[in-house]
Image (tube, rainbow, N blue to C red):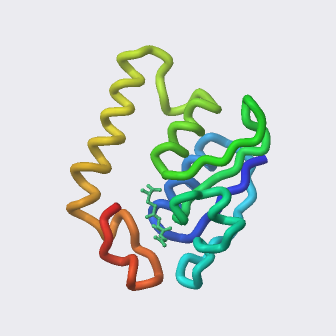
Amino acid sequence: MIDLYFWPTPNGWKIALMLEECGLAYNVVKTDIGRGGQFKPEFIAISRNNKIPAIVDHAGRDGPISVFESGAILLYLAEKTGRFIPRDTHGRYDVSRAQRNTRVRFVPLCPALECACPDPRYGHEAH
Ligand SMILES: N[C@@H](CCC(=O)N[C@@H](CS)C(=O)NCC(=O)O)C(=O)O
């Protein structure tokens, strides 16, 4: 089972969508970033950058593992399930490049898409 540390922001939703598309069972752990949930020591032990999303995979290949940073989580889940990432080097490189290109080229232009958090402090940041 996977624990998803979640709050309804685009970064949070993109991991929820990936888990759904991969058909993985998961448990949502609401982490209210408008009320400081990201600064609780038990959360920082999982996500050192005190940001959602994060996951804990209790059934990781090499044992329980926590992963934070949405791009790293997407890659982790893709590799775990063999979905959305090809096996061959060319295909893997294409996916890697497309993902980075999306974040670098489009996210700074549309910060509200990247992080539409309920707390206005976070509403206009590009990450
Ligand atoms: N680069 C990170 C950005 C994550 C991020 O910015 N999360 C925001 C919500 S959209 C957050 O948790 N903010 C809380 C804070 O910065 O205190 C990723 O892609 O996961």
What percent of the width, then of the height, locates residue 101? 27, 42
Residue that appears at 49% across and 51% down: 70
> Residue 123, relative to residue 89: is it above or below?
below
Q: How many marks?
A: 0
> Residue 118, relative to residue 111: is it above or below?
below
What percent of the width, then of the height, locates residue 75? 51, 37
| Residue 110 in which image quadrant | bottom left
> Residue 111, relative to residue 79: is it above or below?
below
What percent of the width, then of the height, locates residue 96? 37, 33
Residue that appears at 50% across and 18% down: 87
Q: Judge by depth and name the residue closer to the eye, 34 or 12.
A: 34
Q: Judge by depth and name the residue closer to the eye, 86 or 117.
A: 117
Residue that appears at 30% across and 47% down: 102
> Residue 59, relative to residue 94: is it above or below?
below
Q: In the rendered view, does 62 fall on the left or right side of 12?
A: right
Residue that appears at 63% across and 63% down: 44
| Residue 116 in which image quadrant | bottom left
| Residue 127 in which image quadrant | bottom left
Residue sitting farthest toward the top? 88
What percent of the width, then of the height, locates residue 113? 34, 65
Q: In the rendered view, does 55 fall on the left or right side of 60?
A: left
